[in-house]
Amino acid sequence: MAIHKPKQILLVDDDQLFLKLIERVFKKSGFECKSAPSAEAAIELLKKGEVNPDLILSDYEMLKMNGFEFRRYLMNDPAFQDIPFVFLTFFSDKDLMEKGLDLQAIDYVIKDTPINVIVSKINNILFTVDKQRELSENEVKKAAKSLNIKSIPIKAPEIQAFNVDFWHQAYHDIPGGDFIDFIKVNNRYNFIVLGDIMGKKWMAWFFTFGFLSYVRSAVRFAAFNNEYSTAKILQQVNSIICFDEVLKDILSSLSLLLIDSETNKITYSGAGDLPLLHYRSESAELNMISSSGLLLGLFAEGNYNEKEIILKQGDRLFIFTDGMIDFVDANGKKSDYNRFSKALKPFIAKENNFTEIVSNLFNHNLNEQVDDRSIISIYKN
Amino acid sequence: MIEVYNELSDKLLVKLDIKEASLENADAFKTEVIELFDKYKRSIAIDMSSVEYIDSSFLGSIVSALKHLISFKQEMMLVGLNKDIANLFALTRLDKVFKIYSDFDELSK
């Protein structure tokens, strides 16, 4: 479920009185407003990350840097060039307006227009921008669907002696950096992959495929050579990523598990991932299982180790991304692993009740979501 | 976003003045750290005591700024992490990657 934040407008004008007046009206109409008395001050706010506006409304005539120079500056910076930009001007000079629109400003507003009309105009512009963005996203979603590329599988695998389930919720319903894969080698060996690219939304989502293809190839090569070491596989993936020109500045966590259905043994290696939670049915305890490995793409030597986990009947293992431990309270956003573990424990029953846990615990607090959330459960029959 | 506290001969002491470190300010943070480094060419210790939450995008920016400093054989130290963030660093082994101090006093000892 999307959380609708108020739209933020950055107002830029050296006329302090007008700035105060227009700010008051925008705020009254439900906008979040930031104002800057000059283009230079606006650039500083943007660069420092103190504003992240949905739209910039800037005067044309300002001392030092004028509105056109300001717009040209923003157009040369990839971080700001796509922020919708509207000119405010006293002139109804046609040439001036044309020049402004050549700078890909969305529109211009004459300053002596009644302020309420200016607000309505900005509202309409933002609505159109949103609509356009939604259409583009839908196009990308459609294209991805038709190419059959998925960073999250449709269903869980069937693995002898175990029940594997998973749940995934994309942040704001846009595919993001979490990825899951189940790789069946044969009836004996199955790999489980859970990763989280550091980033959100589309950008992170595009990189998941690069990571996933390396993980898949490394797993296949290992299986081909009869080498079933999760630590070696992670080290191999990490080495490749550290050399990959495109991926080397992108970091990802990864949990890699190998289930051996013959010995009922699970081998686990992690790269900067959160510790797994192991529920022991006998003692009704929920314990952490940590690994030593660093994030993929961090250093050429990732220090990956291997943990052996034996699940007894009724035991289970939870593997999850950091979005699961994030939450929002009255004081803002927080990450708390222990809080998640404590919340989860009372929901775990003797039999495999993953669907119930999902509907009672995870689906329940969707409004608290601040990132992609993914969790995999392995239950021993 | 970043305020310079003190310029020591071997390192720069700075403060990150935000409450929520997230996707929205992650890129700006990385650019500022790299600009500071290009200007001062020395290790950077960042006071993070104002930060209450860090998302994975921002963590990515911190780590990638660290990689930049390491490539010039300099370090990045983190100072005054709150309990939740320190715990997150420990859980994901990032505490092995950064030098972490409780405050600037501990750092200068």
Image (tube, rainbow, N blue to C red):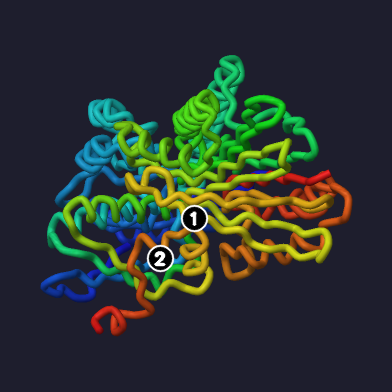
Same chain for labels 2 and 1? Say yes or no. Answer: yes
Q: Is residue B34 above or below residue A204?
A: below
For the residues labelled 2 and 1, say whether their Cβ atoms are less than 8 Å apart: no
Q: Is residue A96 above or below residue A18?
A: above
Residue B59 at x, y = what percent? 42, 55
Q: Which mark, by number, is residue A371?
A: none
Q: Nearer the viewer, mark 2 or mark 1?
A: 1
Q: Which mark, by number, is residue B55?
A: 1
Q: Residue at x 54, y 47 (%)?
A: A269
How many discs appear?
A: 2
Residue farthest to the top?
Answer: A146
Question: Secondary structure under badge 1?
Answer: loop
Task: Please state which of residues A138 and A188 is positioned toward the viewer in this rendering.
Answer: A188
Give the position of the C terminus of chain A as an image quadrant.
top right
Q: Can residue A9 be seen in this snapshot?
A: no
Give the position of the N terminus of chain A as an image quadrant.
top right
Q: Chain of mark 1?
A: B
Residue A73 at x, y = what percent? 22, 40
What whole-number distance in Å separates the C-alpha atoms at marks 2 and 1? 13 Å
Asked if residue A146 lies left or right of residue A16, the reply is: right
The local crowd at label 2, few if under 14, some if 14 to 19, many if 20 or more residues have their Cα within 10 Å, is some
Asked if residue B51 lies left or right of residue A104, the reply is: right
Q: Residue at x 15, y 63 (%)?
A: B42
Q: Is residue B30 above or below residue A151?
A: below
Q: Chain of mark 2?
A: B
Task: Please state which of residues A336 and B24 is positioned toward the viewer in this rendering.
Answer: A336
The local crowd at label 1, few if under 14, some if 14 to 19, many if 20 or more residues have their Cα within 10 Å, is many
Q: Which residue is mark 2?
A: B18
Question: Secondary structure under badge 2?
Answer: loop
Identify which amino acid the numbered label 2 is placed on: Ile
Residue A17 at x, y = what percent? 34, 61
Q: Can residue A1 be seen in this snapshot?
A: yes
